[in-house]
Amino acid sequence: MVSQSNHELGEVAQLIVLQRADGAVLLLENVDGRWNLPGGRLERGETWLAGLQREIFEETGICSFALTGLLTVYQRMSRRTQQPVYGVVFRGTTDESGVVLSEEHRSYRWIESVDACDGMVFYLKQIEEAVRAVLTKEDIWKDAFLAKK
């Protein structure tokens, strides 16, 4: 019989490219100066939506948003634990513009064009790719998965 612990493969992170009606996308600047999306690690027993709601509220104070799609998934190694992190990047919309930052972040920006990404250092390349895809209306899911053989 296989024990449950044999199936714990790592951490799960969920992030969201949160977009306002005017098309602007929310980016958060980490204390180390790299840009990130709202989101974080899924806690044991949480659903995807509950975890995402908790993280968005903790990091931005935003209470209301709607999920509109799935942008990409990725795998990386945690710098902290040296265990795999499986990431999921969602797409969503909000009518809220006000942001109340957590201590994890030092600033935020609502960016309206892909040119605003130039010169920014992102936490992960997958985050930059997802933001650029939303701003340019590119289908990164197809590019990321169907193009590889």
Image (tube, grey):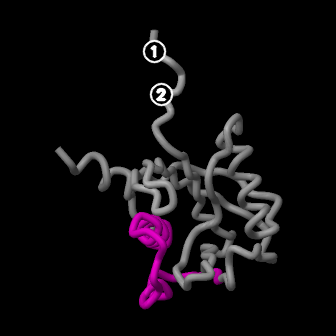
Q: Residue 114 magenta-drawn?
A: yes
User: Which residue in the protein does label 1 denote?
Assistant: 2
Side of 6 relative to 28 (left or right): left
- How far across and down, in percent of the image, does residue 65 sit? 74, 57
| Range shown magenta | 109-136
Side of 142 relative to 93 (left or right): left
Residues at circles 1 and 2 in contact by the CB criterion of under 8 Å: yes
User: Which residue in the protein does label 2 denote?
Assistant: 7
Task: Name the foreground residue: 18 vs 78.
Answer: 78
At x 39% / y 57%, what residue is drawn? Answer: 139
The N terminus: image quadrant: top left
Q: Residues within 10 Å of mark 1 (few under 14, many from 20)?
A: few
- How far across and down, in percent of the image, does residue 106 sit? 68, 84
Name which of mark 1 and mark 2 comes first in the sequence. 1
Q: What kind of residue is marked 1? A: Val
Position of residue 131 relative to residue 2, above or below, is: below
What kind of element bears circle 1?
loop
Q: How many marks?
A: 2
What kind of element bears circle 2?
helix
Position of residue 71 relative to residue 50, above or below, is: below
At x 53% / y 46%, what residue is drawn? Answer: 11
Q: Does residue 119 appear in this view?
A: yes
| Picture quadrant of residue 50 | top right
- How far across and down, in percent of the image, does residue 64 sit? 80, 58
At x 79% / y 61%, what residue is drawn? Answer: 57
Outermost residue, bottom direction?
A: 119
Q: What kind of residue is marked 2? A: His
Outermost residue, left direction?
A: 149
- How far across and down, in percent of the image, does residue 148 sit? 21, 48
Res. 54 mark: none
Q: Residue 145 magenta-drawn?
A: no
